[in-house]
Image: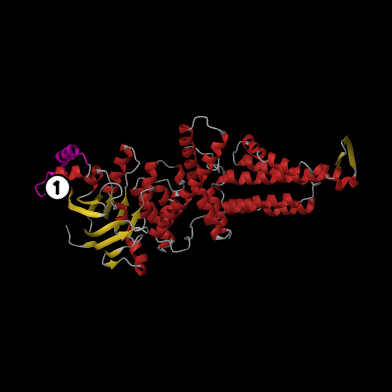
Amino acid sequence: MTSNKVVEIDHLSYQYPDGTPALIDIDLEVYQQESIAILGPNGAGKSTLLYHLNGTLMGAGTVMILGIPVEKKNLKEIRRRVGLVFQSPEDQLFCPTVFDDVAFGPLNMELDEDKVRQRVEKALEMMGLKGFEGRSAHHLSEGEKKRVALATVLSMDSEILALDEPTDNLDPAGSRMLIGRIQSIPQTKIIVTHHLPVAVDLCERAILLYGGRKIEDLPVGELLKDRALLERFGFDADYAQWMYERNVKFQSPSS
Amino acid sequence: MKHAFLDHHSQTESPIHHLDARAKIIVFFTFILIGVSSPPTAFLLFSLLAMALIGIAFLARLPLGHLLKKVLVILPFLFMVTISIPFMKKDALGGGYNLGLGGLSISQSGFWILWNVVIKSCLGVFSIILLSSTTSFPQLIRGMEKLGSPKIFTMLTSFMYRYSFILIDEMYRMRRARDSRCFGRRWFWQTQVIGHMIGTLFLRSFFRGERVYLAMLSRGYHGTMPETTGGRFGFGEVLFLFLSPLLLFLRIYLG
């Protein structure tokens, strides 16, 4: 693992406008090309934490992205570097066609027309969506919508991808397909999920949030072995054990 | 869920479908202008316009029956507006026929007005239906934008197009939820529920609007929609556009 820090969060706290604390004193470091999972029950603050990565929300404390502090004056730069995919593709996809949606980011980056086309083509190809350019989002299946939503940030060529529940609402086949596609993305990934298998398949490290606090920060392999921790978070420890034994990535001597 | 698409048949393959939206918008609007500006006695011009439109429908491989059925949709509205016109007393001087129905008389010029309204609205609606059946909605919006339609207008229209389907889905879901919990209550109670549903739909749309805006910001939106790319103006378009001066000539010569 390179020691290049791409995300550095220091004593981050956030309260909702009504005063309810959503994040309490969070510290987090993410390194280049790492994939981390943010796990936790509903209302733990997972999405809220994710929204701090590109300045959608700004709380007390510091968030640094590639050495740049997330502040109002840097937002343009930050959003170029962090591609955030919202949970609902209906929110992410707002243009009349797939092409327009995937081109939205690059066009806002003021790239020239050829470059935009190249980016769109590449992003759609990576998501297995060649030929979908002219389709409207409401004619797509849920799985296709999720993949287009991912393509909309891939086309921006961001260094960091922040994905909010990427496999939510998908059937098992759609979920597997999407996981496969995400695995092929080389960028640093920060994935919010409450599905343990998603974390196992996609991530090396897991951050566990509960009630707005960071409870644990550990390799996914260790999480799978920690029955007490798993049970505290409502995960099926037997299933976790099975995933641990079955998965070659945990069987190498280094883990 | 299934929707009645606004741009039904717009994915058909035909020479008319392949034309650039700008050419089609200009030509079909010329049809409307020429139709509307002609005197009601220009029978030859009306028949030529109708024949030209039917010719285009034929070239576009659209089922004529379907198009005519769509034109019929305006009849109730037309009926509401025009029903009283032939009975207008004011024009009785132009030569009225007393039907002896309690003093009701039908005036000849009233009939001309009725004919005028009916033929012009039918031709106008037929033109618009042809335009929307040969051009997909996104292309239509892009065409209007390229023809100089205000950006805020095209932006609002494209959002409306994108989200109307989602709103309709949400409404259907709510209606289903209501019907599955409602056992033949009284009509009055139902109106109250419908009121709640409209309120809920409004709130959901409002919050969705917020989330969509955040998704736009996350991809570098800074207040103006990026310029859309694409579109070509070739020989076919020029040839099709030639219909406009031809119509104008006919209008001057025959009107």
Regarding residue A167, the answer to whether it shows in the image is yes
Provide the secondary structure element on which disc 1 rests. Answer: helix
Question: Was residue A234 drawn as part of the magenta stretch in this picture?
Answer: no
Q: Position of residue A42 (x, y in %)?
A: 30, 47
Question: Was residue A246 drawn as part of the magenta stretch in this picture?
Answer: yes
Regarding residue A185, the answer to whether it shows in the image is no
Where residue A59 sits, quadrant-wise, is bottom left
Residue in front for this viewpoint, B44 or B113: B113
Q: Position of residue A25 (x, y in %)?
A: 24, 60
Q: Position of residue B54 (x, y in %)?
A: 67, 40
- Residue drawn at x 73%, y 40% as measured from the top left: B79
Q: Quadrant of the N terminus of chain A?
A: bottom left
Kindly identify which residue carries mark 1: A222
- Residue drawn at x 23%, y 52% as measured from the top left: A36
The single residue placed furthest to the left in the displayed view is A253
Where residue B4 sits, quadrant-wise, is top right
> What range of the chain is rendered magenta?
A235-254
